[in-house]
Image (cartoon, grey):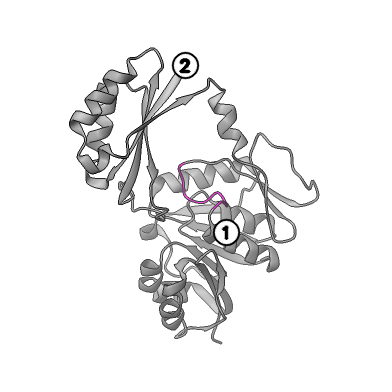
Amino acid sequence: MPWFQARFTTQQPFAENFSDLLMELGAASVTFEDAEDQPLLEPPPGETPLWELINVVGLFDAELNQQEIRQQLLRQLPEDNATTLRFVPLEEQDWVRAWMDDFHPMQFGQRLWIIPSWSEPVDPEGVNILLDPGLAFGTGTHSTTALCLEWLDAHPPTGQKVIDYGCGSGILAIAAAKLGASQIDGVDNDPQALIATHDNAEKNRVTHIQGFLPDTFPKEQKADLLLANILAGPLEELAPTFASHVVAGGSIVLSGILQEQAESVSRVYSRWFEMEPAAIDDAWVRLTGTKHR
């Protein structure tokens, strides 16, 4: 067994210090895992949020003295963390291949597919988006993104002007483009997201997506459809702004909303939109509405 893991659970404030400790003890790498299935969505620029309870995992060469590492950790970990400490042997494997095997083509609705670059399209006649897992938020694996993609598949924005607010990886903007939108504006407060959107659009041979930071997005810009997969709080704060960007009779699609937040968000938007019943997937909600004429 050429590798082994040292794993234990700790609270968020201590995770970084214990990561440093594992590296001092010879770890080749340290990773953090969610210990309680706590959701984290898109963070503000410059922030790296962590879960409240974290599994800290150190990867060690099997030639190192496992017993000595155990003793060092038991001496320095608080008792409630030390009781969770365990060592796991690992077989040698192709880690890149193992990572790639976790991601497969995903279908949304009838004809929309997200395809990793190393995979062949399942349906060559479908609407296929090439997108690899990466740092920018939005690769289709989360319910909030899936709900938006399914809506787009059922309501293709043929010939429409579209705004993707909080564009992340550009996945919704690219889907709208491939489903016939005539103009797409992607807006995000993270410059890295705009770079990712541009790069992914190029990979998909989509040339009519423009990227904007919120401060540079034209206030007079109007769209037939506005998509916003962000968070409930910002959605409520941005409601007047979003309403000003949607033409009369146009559509709004909102996601990133927990089920218990849906009524509040819908109530805010009902001032400008005729809101429809929520669509729910795994405790996450998509809200849609039509702008009052």
In the image, residue 221 sits, relative to residue 274, either above or below, namely above
- Residue at 43% of width from left, 83% of height from top? 267
Query: Relative to the observer, which residue lies in front, 67 or 125?
Result: 67
- Residue at 61% of width from left, 53% of height from top? 174
Is disc 1 in contact with disc 2, using a CB cutoff of under 8 Å? no
| Residue at which label 1 appears | 184
| Quarter of the view holding residue 59 | top left
Q: Which amino acid does label 1 sit on?
A: Ile
Which element is circle 2 on? loop
| Quarter of the view holding residue 131 | top right
Coordinates of residue 142 in the picture (x, y in percent): 53, 55
**Mark closer to the observer (1, 2):** 2
Q: How far apart are marks 1 and 2 (CA)?
A: 50 Å
Q: What residue type is labelled 2?
A: Pro
Region rendered in magenta: 135-141
Say left or right for 271 vs 93.
Answer: left
Say left or right for 211 vs 105.
Answer: left
The numbered mark at residue 2 is 2
| Residue furthest right as drawn | 125
Query: Relative to the observer, which residue lies in front, 242 or 288?
Result: 288
In the image, residue 98 sits, relative to residue 154, either above or below, namely above
Q: How crowded is mark 2: few (under 14 residues within 10 Å), some or many (20 or more)?
A: few
Q: Is residue 195 magenta?
A: no
